[in-house]
Image (cartoon, helix red, strand yellow):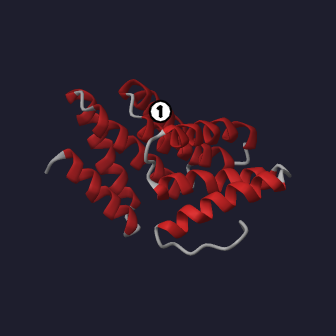
Amino acid sequence: MKLEERIDAAWQARREGRHEAAQRELLEVITTSRKAGKRLVLIRALKALAHVVRDRGEDERALPLYEEAITLCRDEGDDLLLAHTVRHLGDLHRATGRLLEAEPYYDEALTLYRRAATPPPLDYANALSPMALLKRDQGDIDMARRLWSEARALYESVGIDVPQEPE
């Protein structure tokens, strides 16, 4: 089975709640892709493993996985891949109550999406909405509403119905 297929199989295991199997598979893919110099596969596997360990409540274990993936993304020069990855690190920081650490990652993700000629609407919306929640949590309600409005329009453009205000 190809490395990419093994990552897909790990995602399926994750969806089925088989986190141990997903983790095992992803650790093997990470080792193999490192040895083979397959950087994009390595990025994808690191991010997938970060999701799996977060599902298991091991947020701090996800931190170095995202950080390594971000370093690799920067080396690759793929702004959209980088934007998606830094947004997830922002999510990790926000979920663990580190709002000040989360904000620069959300800012970077939004800058990269805004700079892109055609950012994927769902990915862009998924970066706007946690920044809106962050701003709300920081007490900047006006900015939270503006960001949420922008996110909501993007969600609606891909057929996802969301509430008027973030909950």
In the image, residue 50 lies at what x, y percent? Answer: 46, 46
In the image, residue 42 lies at what x, y percent? Answer: 32, 37
Give the structural element (helix, strand or loop) at label 1: helix
Please identify the quadrant where the C terminus is shown: bottom right
Seen in the image, is 2 located left or right of residue 34? left
- Residue 137, relative to residue 164: is it above or below? above
In the image, residue 118 lies at what x, y percent? Answer: 43, 47
Q: Residue furthest right?
A: 139
- Residue 10, relative to residue 60: is it above or below? below
Q: Which one is nearer the viewer's eye here, 74 or 15?
A: 74
Q: Which one is nearer the viewer's eye here, 91 or 36?
A: 91
Q: Tell me where residue 76 sits by quadrant.
A: top left
Q: Tell me where residue 15 sits by quadrant.
A: bottom left
Q: Which residue is mark 1?
A: 70
Q: Residue at x 69, y 54 (%)?
A: 147
In the image, residue 130 lies at what x, y percent? Answer: 64, 54
Residue 61 visible? The answer is no
Q: Residue at x 28, y 30 (%)?
A: 34
Residue 127 visible? The answer is yes
Seen in the image, is 123 located left or right of residue 133? left
Q: Residue at x 35, y 43 (%)?
A: 44
